[in-house]
Amino acid sequence: MSEIIRISEEELDRQRAWSDAFAALPHRPETYYIVTYGCQMNAHDSEKIAGILESMGMRPASERTQADFVLHNTCCIRDNAERKALGNVTWLKEVRRDRPGMLIGVCGCMVQQPGMAAKLLRQYPFIDLAFGTGNLYRLPELLFRAAESGKRVIDIPAEESTLAESLPIRRSSPFQAYVTIMYGCNNYCSYCIVPYVRGRERSRRSNDILREIEELQRGGVREIMLLGQNVNSYGSGSEEDISFASLLRMIGRTGIERIRFMTSHPKDLSDELIDEMAHNPHILRHFHLPVQSGSNRVLQAMNRRYTREKYLERLSALRAAMPDIGVTTDLIVAFPGETEAEFEDTLSLTEEAQFDSAFTFIYSPRAGTKAAQLPGAIMPEVATERIERLIALQEGITDRILAEQTGKRVNVLVTGHARREDDLLTGKCERNISVNFPGPDECIGSIVPVEITSAKKTTLRGKIIKEQTA
Ligand code: SAH
Ligand code: SF4
Ligand code: F3S
């Protein structure tokens, strides 16, 4: 097991010197474009990468075909994520025929898979720059070397569980912000590649987290999303004696208006956390609690370390403390050896749990994981049939829950205009459901009270509640 490496101030200073050296290079790349795949972790890493690139004097290009440096921040959670990234990288090779000098880069989880560095070297000779998830902070040095030498730079350390503070961040929203509280994962769910590509679980110091949040708040941020693969185990194994619930209590005291977090692992969902949520007015009423399967045999084979009964008990505890909480989940169908009866256990759990919504996935074998060795692969047509039945069931539940919101009063952080209905404003309510409603543009960036008037598929409709003035 690799140890956790805190990146020193001296190393970050060294990288700042590389940034300056890059900025002074004649004929250096001037513009960048980042293509991001995968989860919020990657989205936030891309914000850090953009921050670093801008500290090196680069500016964003409006389209990837126009950029001097195109970086793909990849995901490998399922086979299709990986194929999409590699397909787009290869497509760019063609674009470069008209734009010689364009630098093509890849980074992120896919790159960090065992054996991938060798594969990139052999099969993708047109990639100029590749780095892993643990050495992102070294981008100034790596990009300098690639730009100056014109040679490819592939720097993918086997497994690095690093923790770097104070990297520059170019945030994509002025009023919502991601804040990582922990990196990596130690859970080794048998199907999952994340522990192999993101390294050991490591928590940031609470002081560093609080300082970042206070700064965001001073800058006008209204809502933060705390990030980690398993936020419920925040603090375990760190030098501080601290739990996720106590971190939330401290964050609540900063006065930041709205707090969200993801993802939580059911095995670590404590009564202390439920109690903190119920009493902390800043924490919003949404809980993403991936269950994966409703069958105890499958849950055990997945190494999830809870049973269906335990999961449902935790769900009841959450709802007993917060009757208005919205719960969402992740579900996997067609895990190796999953029988029809075991799949039906997932259906019955979905029915019983009444999730606001669910992300549903067909199991995808990942090389190097335990489950990839298991016999009993499910035929693709059976897998498709199962996921369709599961989606149909969940859609009915989502429809009913959304219809029930009619007449309720919610608070929406207005983030912009609705994608399909440009004349309406949009934002998320406490339960993390999108709400569209008419209103003036001045509302963008503020939290407004809205009454729900109807539901449409996955979105709610509403109208702004005008406060009575005496
Ligand atoms: N850390 C989070 C989830 C990270 S991955 C957690 O533990 O819940 C997001 C989701 O992708 C998982 O919840 C799971 O449902 C799905 N997933 C992960 N590996 C997968 C695989 N090999 N095949 C299909 N789905 C997978
Ligand atoms: Fe993957 Fe499990 Fe870790 Fe989530 S908790 S990232 S599913 S190993
Ligand atoms: Fe996220 Fe994909 Fe990596 S889901 S942690 S970007 S493998």
Image: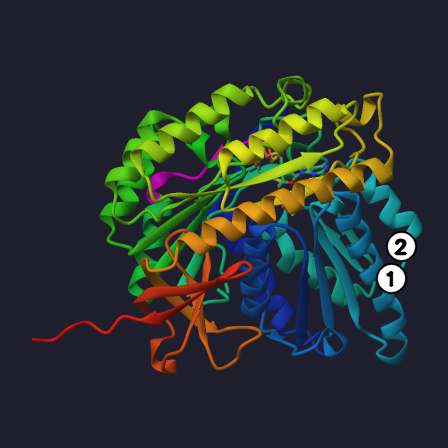
Kindly identify which numbered label has been placed on residue 32. Answer: none
Kindly identify which numbered label has been placed on residue 90. Answer: 1
Vertical arrangement, residue 462 with respect to residue 206, above or below: below
Vertical arrangement, residue 443 with respect to residue 367, above or below: below
The image's colouring method is rainbow
SS state under label 2: loop
Q: Nearer the viewer, residue 444 or 72?
A: 444
The percent coordinates of residue 231 (x first, y second) are: 46, 36
Vertical arrangement, residue 167 with respect to residue 323, above or below: below
Q: Residue at x 19, y 72 (%)?
A: 467
Dot 1 crowding, Cα within 10 Å, few <14, some 14–19, many 20+: some
Hey, what amino acid is under mark 2?
Answer: Tyr
Q: Residue at x 32, y 70 (%)?
A: 446
Total numbered circles: 2
The percent coordinates of residue 159 (x first, y second) are: 68, 35
The percent coordinates of residue 297 (x first, y second) are: 66, 17
Residue 421 shown in magenta:
no
Residue bounds of the magenta highlight: 200-207
**Residue extending farthest right:** 122
Hey, what amino acid is under mark 1?
Answer: Thr
Q: Gap in Å between the C-alphas at discs 1 and 2? A: 8 Å
Q: Residue at x 36, y 28 (%)?
A: 317
Kindly identify which numbered label has been placed on residue 124. Answer: 2
91 with respect to 460 (left or right) = right
Tag 1 near tag 2, CB within 8 Å: yes
Residue 202 shown in magenta:
yes
